[in-house]
Image (cartoon, helix red, strand yellow):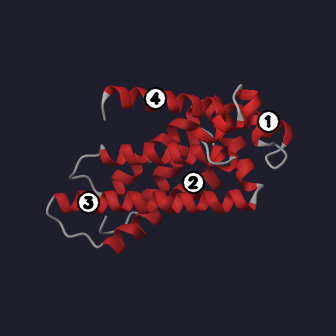
Amino acid sequence: MGAGGSLREVSRRAVQSRIARTAEALFVVKGFEETTVDEIAAAVGMSQRSFFRYFASKDEVVLDSVERLGEELSARLEARPPGESVWDSLRRAFDPVVERLADPAVRERDQVLHEIVSASPRLLAAYLGRLDLLQRSLAELLVERAGQSGAEPDAVVVRAIVGGAFACLQAASLHCGTDPEVFGPCLDRTMEALRPVAA
């Protein structure tokens, strides 16, 4: 991608971020279901038509954070050394989650989004669908990486390992809370306890 394309993407991301922050503030005050796209667009200072250039729906505004986190996890995983074990690479790919908890403002925003998603069956289903797609994407990255080093990975096993790593992430989140001083060590302990023999 050329410099112009990169600049456009950065600009687009900035506008999306502004829309998302504005929408989240409205969701907190009015409730997700009660907030309309027209209200979000008006609060941002744009038309409804302009809003739809950036998001297909208000659901997508909430789920955008999952997309961005997924991109970050994928980038971290791709950056891991080729010879590193799958399990250790996945643990390091989860570092952005730990880092987000260390930022009070981000932590509070993520908690608000979590409450919005949990309160809406439609959003929760979409969120779980996005998480499944993220796991598939990470598994494909790991299979590709193994293939580049001459190995012949079992895609089913790799997918199961990725699912197991996410189960550790979920367990740490549920049982250790969002305190960054507690969460990171809890995630480490959980993943070490469940380390697969072949990973």
Q: Is residue 11 above or below residue 60?
A: above
Q: Which residue is identified by label 4?
A: 10
Task: Kindly check if marks 2 and 3 are in contact, taking CB atoms under 8 A apart as contact.
Answer: no
Alpha-carbon span between mark 1 and mark 3 = 44 Å
Q: Residue furthest left?
A: 150
Lower sequence index among marks 4 and 3 = 4
Q: Amino acid at mark 2?
A: Ala
Label 4 crowd bin: few (<14), some (14–19), many (20+), radius 10 Å = few
Label 3 crowd bin: few (<14), some (14–19), many (20+), radius 10 Å = some
Lower sequence index among marks 4 and 1 = 4
Q: What's the mark number on residue 39?
A: 1
Circle 2: element type? helix
Q: Is residue 70 above or below residue 124?
A: above
Q: Give the residue drawn at x 29%, y 68%.
A: 198
Label 1 crowd bin: few (<14), some (14–19), many (20+), radius 10 Å = some
List x then y, in percent, for residue 130: 55, 57
Q: What's the mark number on residue 172?
A: 2
**How many numbered circles are shown?**
4
Query: Which quadrant, please, contains the C terminus?
Result: bottom left
Q: Amino acid at mark 3?
A: Glu
Lower sequence index among marks 1 and 3 = 1
Q: Which residue is identified by label 3?
A: 144
Residues 30 and 146: in front is: 30
Classify residue 152 by image quadrant.
Answer: bottom left
Circle 3: element type? helix
Q: Give the residue drawn at x 34%, y 51%.
A: 89
